[in-house]
Image (cartoon, grey):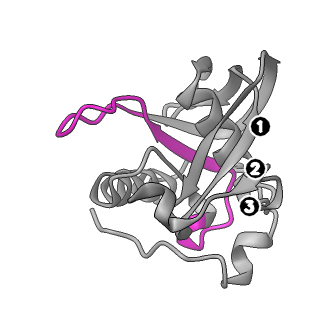
Amino acid sequence: MAILKIITEEDETLRKKSKPVTEITPRILTILDDMKDTLIQADGVGLAAVQTGILRRMFIINTSVEEGKAEIVEFINPEIIKTSGNQQEVEGCLSVPGKYGITSRPQKVTVRATNRNGEEFEFTGEGLFARCLCHEYEHLDGILYTDNVVKMLDPEDFE
């Protein structure tokens, strides 16, 4: 397993639409494993393959916010199938380091995806995880949270 380089907003790859995964190959599994190591090392909540320069429709999220404990959920070819409610909260991105903004997202989101074994599943996230699901899903279409931010925050707001 390896730590992948996370590309930043200056890289045009982030603006490209990711392609569906047509077959779960050993290479796809290696990418997912490397993404997990990368996400944990970066202390992030979510990571899309495109953020590592790989244009495939997959992302992962860490459903545990406890330090030292990682519970990673992998999403291959995800689709948002249901949303409800609304929240406006602070959001950041590993590909937009040091910048934060207020976004408007659904309070609850359900995603249908395929796991590494080729099995379809549904995952529902609320609050932070609803934001994360939307955020990572948008990455797959070349959208950054800064495109839809309600208000960017000043760095001194976090001191």
Between discs 2 and 1, the one toward the N terminus: 1
- Element type at marker 3? helix
Residue at 55%, 29% (x, y): give it: 129
Q: Is label 2 in contact with label 1 (beta carbons under 8 Å)?
A: no
Report the disc number at residue 104. Answer: 1
Q: Quadrant of residue 145?
A: bottom right
Residue at 28%, 36% (x, y): give it: 70
Between discs 2 and 3, the one toward the N terminus: 2
Q: Is residue 111 left or right of residue 80?
A: left
Please identify the quadrant where the C terminus is shown: bottom left
Please identify the quadrant where the N terminus is shown: bottom left
Q: Amino acid at mark 2?
A: Glu
- Element type at marker 2? helix
Q: Main secondary structure of the magenta part?
A: loop
Q: Is residue 110 left or right of residue 75?
A: right
Bounds of the magenta segment: 51-72
Q: Say if the magenta span includes residue 120.
A: no
Q: Amino acid at mark 3?
A: Thr
Between discs 3 and 1, the one toward the N terminus: 1
Mark-to-mark CA distance, 2 and 1: 13 Å
Q: Is residue 21 left or right of residue 33?
A: right
Mark 3 neighbour density, 10 Å: few (under 14) some (14–19) many (20 or more): some
* Mark whose residue sits in front, 2 or 1: 1
Mark-to-mark CA distance, 2 and 3: 11 Å
Q: Quadrant of residue 144?
A: bottom right
Q: Say if the magenta span includes residue 71.
A: yes
Residue 84 position, x and y percent, is 79, 15
Q: What residue did someone put label 2 on?
A: 138
Q: Amino acid at mark 1?
A: Ser
Mark-to-mark CA distance, 3 and 1: 11 Å
Mark 2 neighbour density, 10 Å: few (under 14) some (14–19) many (20 or more): some
Q: Is residue 1 left or right of residue 38?
A: left
